[in-house]
Image (cartoon, rainbow, N blue to C red):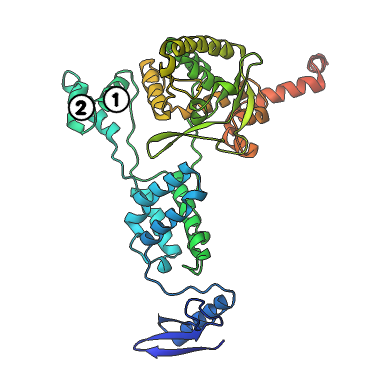
């Protein structure tokens, strides 16, 4: 295989004939590329291109844009990706990638372009307006001047729904005040976007659309190490007392005593619950895809599908709940929704995971508790279990963490708090109580 370099105007172009015929035409394709500033640069690029051709990685020049490639890519990989992952990645592409680099030619997408994208997303990438803080500013301003505005007035002034304004005003009155949201995306979100781009560019290389994967040479933003807010035992007990008469009180109790994921608790079925031996097998998942709830077999990680024990109080609460549910099933008869879900509405319909999250937000605000997310109940359980002296490996397995090492990193601050107690316990066991008194008497 021989190449040639020649000048065209003010730039240089390389050209060579591929070693293998094109099956569709039966001819040897000619590969060329121009625009090089010097003859030396053109020769270097020519040698690199010929080496790639020898290895079967011929990339033909194309004007395909990033947007055009992503449209093709999402269609091709939908069947091979988890539904929630596919939808999340597609949302990332639509909201954060296409608006910024969608018009860039795929073959020209390089490392500096990706670094500029990530920097912009970190500083000004948020597309959703901070309506919560806007509502609070309006409500607080008018509350200081006189009578606090009604939810309808807040909704009309800030362009939100009456439901959002009503929930917001309830939070403000209970002392749960928002802070202004940063206009940039969180580093974790940008890391997720990077993961999507990395996978897409790897496929572009495999499909011979690009010569190399630029995302492979770019480091995503560092993951923030901020601690999540959790409830202490007093907060948890206050919440459970406040929701004791709520329809889903046993759901919240099970969440707080096991720490299983939201989708798993919404997708739990009675054939996976054994109240006699007090065990729950976590398997089925109820996930949200494009706003709609759907059932999905299998958990989020390889350790998510497992059987875990539940305590006596939680088991008793579930028995009482099942009796109530059986009465409702008898009342509705043939109109009762099939599925055998543990937690349902009166007619047997399983709850939408987002409705459970919203219900929790309302109940926590009404109880006057520190604002946390439903997912933070999982962290609250793990933190409380560690402080109660449960082995970290056991806690990690119970909540279905894929990596015990990551679990220990996440909850290192909790374990560190027990360091002094550990020192005292170990010393007491090793040297006994008499050592100190005899040393003192001498």
Is residue 353 visible in this depiction of the protein? yes
Where is the N terminus found, in terms of image quarters? bottom right
Q: Viewed as shown, does residue 153 lie left or right of 262?
A: left
The residue drawn where x is 54% and y is 24% is 269
Question: Residue 271 appears at what percent x and percent y?
Answer: 58, 22
Residue that mark 2 sits on? 154
C-alpha distance separating marks 2 and 1: 9 Å
Question: Residue 224 appears at what percent x and percent y?
Answer: 48, 42
Q: How many other residues sit within 10 Å of disc 2, few (<14), some (14-19) or many (≥20)?
A: many
Is residue 241 visible in this depiction of the protein? no
Q: Nearer the viewer, residue 309 or 419?
A: 309
Q: Is residue 62 above or below residue 313?
A: below
Question: Residue 150 appears at what percent x and percent y?
Answer: 19, 20
Residue that mark 1 sits on? 168
The residue drawn where x is 46% and y is 9% is 327
Check residue 270 in the rendering and tell me which mark sits there, or answer none: none
Q: Nearer the viewer, residue 115 or 258?
A: 258
> Contact, CB < 8 Å: mark 2 with mark 1?
yes
Residue sitting farthest toward the front? 334
Q: Earlier in the sequence, mark 2 or mark 1?
A: 2
Question: Residue 291 appears at what percent x and percent y?
Answer: 37, 36
Q: How many other residues sit within 10 Å of disc 1, few (<14), some (14-19) or many (≥20)?
A: many
Total numbered labels placed on residues in the image: 2
Where is the C terminus found, in terms of image quarters? top right
Q: Helix or strand or loop: what does disc 2 sit on? A: helix
Q: Is residue 44 above or below residue 243?
A: below
Q: Is residue 354 above or below residue 67?
A: above
Q: Helix or strand or loop: what does disc 1 sit on? A: helix
């Amino acid at each position: 295989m021989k190449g040639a370099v020649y000048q065209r105007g003010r730039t240089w172009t390389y050209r060579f004939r591929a070693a293998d015929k094109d099956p569709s035409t039966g001819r040897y394709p000619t590969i060329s590329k121009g625009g090089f500033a010097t003859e030396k640069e053109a020769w270097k690029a020519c040698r690199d291109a010929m080496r790639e051709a020898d290895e079967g990685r011929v990339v033909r020049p194309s004007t395909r844009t990033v947007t055009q490639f992503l449209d093709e890519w999402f269609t091709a990989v939908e069947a091979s990706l988890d539904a929630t992952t596919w939808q999340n990645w597609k949302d990332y592409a639509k909201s954060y990638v296409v608006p910024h680099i969608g018009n860039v030619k795929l073959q020209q997408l390089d490392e500096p372009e990706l670094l500029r994208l990530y920097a912009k997303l970190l500083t000004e990438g948020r597309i959703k307006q901070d309506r919560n803080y806007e509502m609070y500013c309006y409500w607080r301003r008018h509350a200081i001047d006189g009578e606090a505005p009604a939810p309808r007035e807040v909704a009309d002034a800030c362009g939100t729904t009456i439901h959002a304004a009503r929930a917001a005003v309830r939070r403000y009155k209970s002392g749960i005040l928002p802070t202004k949201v940063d206009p940039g995306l969180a580093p974790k979100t940008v890391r997720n976007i990077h993961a999507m781009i990395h996978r897409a560019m790897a496929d572009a290389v495999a499909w011979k659309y690009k010569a190399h994967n630029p995302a492979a040479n770019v480091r995503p933003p560092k993951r923030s190490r901020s601690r999540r807010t959790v409830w202490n035992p007093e907060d948890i007990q206050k919440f459970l007392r406040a929701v004791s008469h709520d329809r889903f009180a046993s759901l919240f109790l099970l969440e707080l005593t096991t720490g299983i994921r939201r989708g798993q608790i919404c997708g739990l079925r009675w054939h996976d619950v054994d109240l006699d031996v007090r065990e729950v097998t976590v398997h089925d998942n109820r996930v949200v895809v494009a706003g709609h709830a759907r059932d999905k077999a299998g958990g989020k990680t390889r350790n998510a599908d497992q059987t875990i024990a539940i305590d006596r109080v939680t088991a008793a609460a579930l028995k009482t709940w099942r009796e109530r549910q059986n009465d409702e099933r008898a009342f509705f008869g043939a109109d009762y929704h099939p599925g055998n879900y543990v937690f349902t509405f009166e007619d047997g319909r399983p709850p939408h995971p987002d409705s459970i999250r919203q219900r929790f937000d309302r109940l926590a605000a009404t109880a006057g508790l520190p604002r946390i997310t439903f997912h933070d109940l999982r962290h609250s359980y793990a933190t409380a279990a560690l402080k109660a002296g449960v082995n970290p490996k056991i806690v990690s397995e119970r909540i279905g963490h894929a990596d015990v090492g990551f679990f220990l990193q996440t909850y290192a601050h909790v374990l560190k708090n027990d360091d002094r107690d550990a020192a005292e316990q170990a010393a007491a066991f090793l040297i006994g109580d008499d050592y100190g008194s005899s040393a003192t008497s001498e």
